[in-house]
Every structure is written in structure tokens, then in C-alpha cells.
Amino acid sequence: MMNVMIVEDETIMRLALTTLIDWESNGFRIVYEASNGYQALEYIKENREIDIMITDLKMPVMDGLELIDELNQLNGTSPHVVILSAYDDFEFVRKAFKRGVQDYILKSEMDPNIVLDLFNRIKHDCEVKQNMSRKSIEIRNGERMRLKQQTIREWLEIGVNSQFDPFVLEDLKMRLEWTHITVSMIRVEGFAEVQERYGSAIGDFVSSVLKSIDQVLAEAGTGEVISWNTYEYVVLLSFATNSLMYVRQSISQIMDQIIFVLKEYINIQVTIGVSELCEELKQIPAFYLQARKNADLRFVINKHRVIYPEDANHFLKQSGESLIGKEQALLDALKEREEQAVLQELDHMFALIKRSASMGNEVLRARYMELLMILVKFMYDNEFVNSLEMDKIEDVYRMAWQVDSADSLQDSISNFVLQLLQESDKKAGQMNRVVAIAQAYIMEHYREEITLGKVSEMVHLSESHFSTLFSKAVGETFKEFVTKVRMEKAMESMKKEPYLKIYEIAERTGYASTEHFSRVFKKATGISPNQFIRSVAK
């Protein structure tokens, strides 16, 4: 268990950090919180068991830089420092780096997974250091490697400072030139399986990936790689020529070799998004974002491949639209239960959704969620929702946010709709039987008092559901059907027994009041009961 201290003058930020992740279950214990550097320093002087200290840079009494200076003066081991910084803290961050700080967290991007990855890496590094007995040159090489990684990360996030010393490339032994640079985002697919395979030794996996990629780059004579997190790696390549044909061929060979090596030796598959060629280092942040965006297109273009800018253009030049208002043809096909027409309309919807690729994966997923909402509304409107169907809906909803391939998600939605059609056919048959039972009951008991509530209870449906179902199936309301049956029976009696009194006919057809019967009869036939009897008696 590693002991952690938080040094932050803002109470809300301290609370955010303490509740960001489940620290103890991940091997960390927050043992102290300080509101300024002086409090933190006094505590550490008395309690040297702090392993990691998260500190803000701008604080009252003693700021983060002063605290770091004081820690560097202490005898013995000092905690591993992680600084909290904002984008406008650039100069503070640079000064902290010069004081030996190696890691930082952006306040605006405190993602639990990123923070946990950082702390797991620190934990791993600390555990390795405890068991290390290396020569001083190896230590220097390790420091150079970490500084190289930090420098590249800084370039990608913030950009290259105008005062950047070009000799740093030489000092850090970077295989990079100042111009003709590309950025590539390498994303590990099926990372959940990788985590399960490596468990707590995930740091070994990261090291293996970095070493494998670095070996490919060393053989190519160009490029540097850093670990962005445990499942994403960024490669910078540079070329001494501006020949696009040569550059593209070289990139293709290097990326194909990286894919091969990672599959062959580490048994992982990756998708790589490649940026366009940028002319100078200061452009790197924009091209890094382009590489990440191209890698994100794996959701619609397909995984396990290299996605170049020209591959992305087909999707990125299209603009997405909401599906609302374009669903009627699909709903009509569903109502008619025409499977081919339904699948055809689904394909049309999928094509509309993919036009949203330029807006990013979150918008894409939102479009798929719109389609699911349209299907769910159809189910509710047509009384197809029960506990079993809700489970199916929830399964597809979960997949919409977890699956990393549009094709896989579309297959799941299509299968769900086909199941819906099967249930629709089955339910239609069941409903027809329910209506038939109700009609038979009315035909047999028309002499008695018949109410909607009584018949719906008999067929185990709610009054509103049964009433709607009956009207759709028969083409007239429940009351209209009962009246029609009674009038037909009344006319049959009048034809067969014209001598019967009107009140007798009324009683035989379920009417206690002769006046009521007569009004209903005339409304239904256009003539009174007496007129009808006289007409059939002639």
C-alpha cells in the first residue's frame, strides 16, 4: 500500500481528488491533506512514510515550487511529486520539471482512468526502484528516457515553446528532425482481455509495447514513441525529405511493421491513426489531435488497420443529421411486419448515422441511441414492452456505449429488430385469438349485461389496451360491435316471430328499457322497431 498526500488550497479540488477513484482498492492510501506547502513540509519532516505527493503549484504561504525546493533539500528519500496544473501554468510546469518533477495532472482533465494509470505507473516504477541495483550509467539513461517522454508529451499537449533549444534533440538522443513530422496514435484493441491477462503486471505490458515499437523505429532510423496511457501510444516520425511519395511509403512500411511485431510478439492487435505531414514542431498539438481523430474512426472504418488522412476524408467531409423526422418509412415497414423492407430501411438509417463520423464517436453513438429510442417508442406504442423485451433493450443500450465497432453495433440492432418482428408476429397471432374469444363471448351472451371491463378482465387485459386492440382488429369500437350484434339478433327475432312485443324483443337482446332499445334500433337501422316489423310482415 502506497501512502499519498494531497497539497491543495482549494477544498473542492481536494475533495475531487479524494473521491476521484477508489484509492485503497487500487493499492493507495491518502494519509494527509494540506492546504499549503508549509503544512505539507512540516508533516513530511515528522512523517517520512509519504510515497507520493500531489501538489498544486499556486498556493498561499508556500507555493508548490517552494515546496519542491524544500523537499529537494531534505536528507533521505523524498516523496514522488505529481503536480496539479492548469493550461495557463505552463511556466510553472517547466520550472517544476527543472526541479526534477516527472509527472503532472491537468485539473481540466482529471479522468479517473488516466489518473489511475499514472499512479499505477508510479507505483510500478517505485517497486522496480526498490529492487534495482543498476550502474550509474543505466540510471542516467533511465532519466534521459523519462525526460524524453515528458518532453514529447509536453509537445503534444502544449506545443513547442518559441525559446526551445534545438540541441535538446541531440542531448536526449531523439531520432527526430525539426521538419516533415507526422504523428500517429496507436490504440490497443480488446484491452479488457489484455488487462485480464497481465493483471497487476500491466506495467510489463506497457514496457513490452514501448520496446517493440522502439525497436522498429530504431531499425527505420527515425521516430520516437511514448506511452500516452496503458492502451494508447503515440509515435512521432520525421523525414529529411519533403517527397510525399517517399514519406508515405516509409510511413506505410513502418506502421505495417509495428502492427506485425505487436501481433507476433505481444499477441495484441492495434488500430493506428496517422496525421498529415506537418512542417514544424509547433504544429504538433493540432496534428496529434488529427491522428487521434483518425484513430477514432476505427468505429466506422474498421479496426486492426492503419487509417490515413485520405481514408478519413470520405467520412469527415460528410455532415451528420438527426434521425428524428426520417423514421416513418421504418415504422411503416415494422407495422406491416415486412422483414426485407425493415432491413432495407435500417440500412438507410445506418448510412445516415455514419455521416456523423466527422462529429466524433460520442455524436455517432448518440445517433445510434436515437435509432434505439425510435424502436423503443414503436414498442411502447404497439404494446410490445414486457420485462423480457426491456431486458433486450437494455442489452442493446449497454452495447451502444461499450462496443468499439459500428458494424458490431449495427448487427446487434438488426438482430434486435428481427427478434422484434418475430415477437410482433407472435403477438399478432395471440391478439387475434384474444379478439376472437371476446367476439364469441359477446355472440353468446348478448342477452346479458356486457361491459368493456367485464370482457377485458376475462381476457386478462387492461380496459384501455383491450379497447384499442379490439378496435384495431375489428374495425369498430367494442360498444359499436355489441350494439351491432344485438341489433342483428333483434332483427332476426322480428323476422321469425313478428307477433312478439317490442319489450320482449328488447329483453331478449339485453335491453331493460324499451325506450332505450327503440332509440338504439332507430339509430342503427334508420327506422323504428314497429316500422321494421310492419315491413317484414308484408
Image: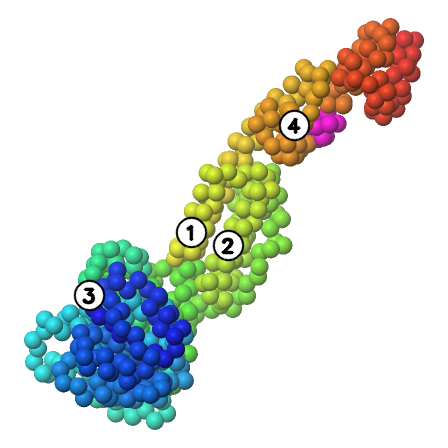
- Residue carrying label 4: 453
Q: Is residue 133 above or below residue 116?
A: below
- Residue carrying label 3: 1
Please report contact status of discs 2 and 4: CB closer than 8 Å, yes or no: no
- Name the element at disc 4: helix
Amino acid of disc 3:
Met
Amino acid of disc 2:
Met
Mark 2 vs mark 4, CA separation in Å: 38 Å
Taking 123 as reference, is 165 left or right?
right
- Residue carrying label 1: 398
Q: Is residue 424 visible from the viewing direction of this image? A: yes
Taking 131 as reference, is 164 left or right?
right
Amino acid of disc 1:
Arg
Give the mark, 3 or 1, whose residue is nearer the N terminus: 3
- Residue carrying label 2: 369
- Name the element at disc 3: loop
- Name the element at disc 1: helix
Q: Nearer the viewer, residue 45 or 323?
A: 45
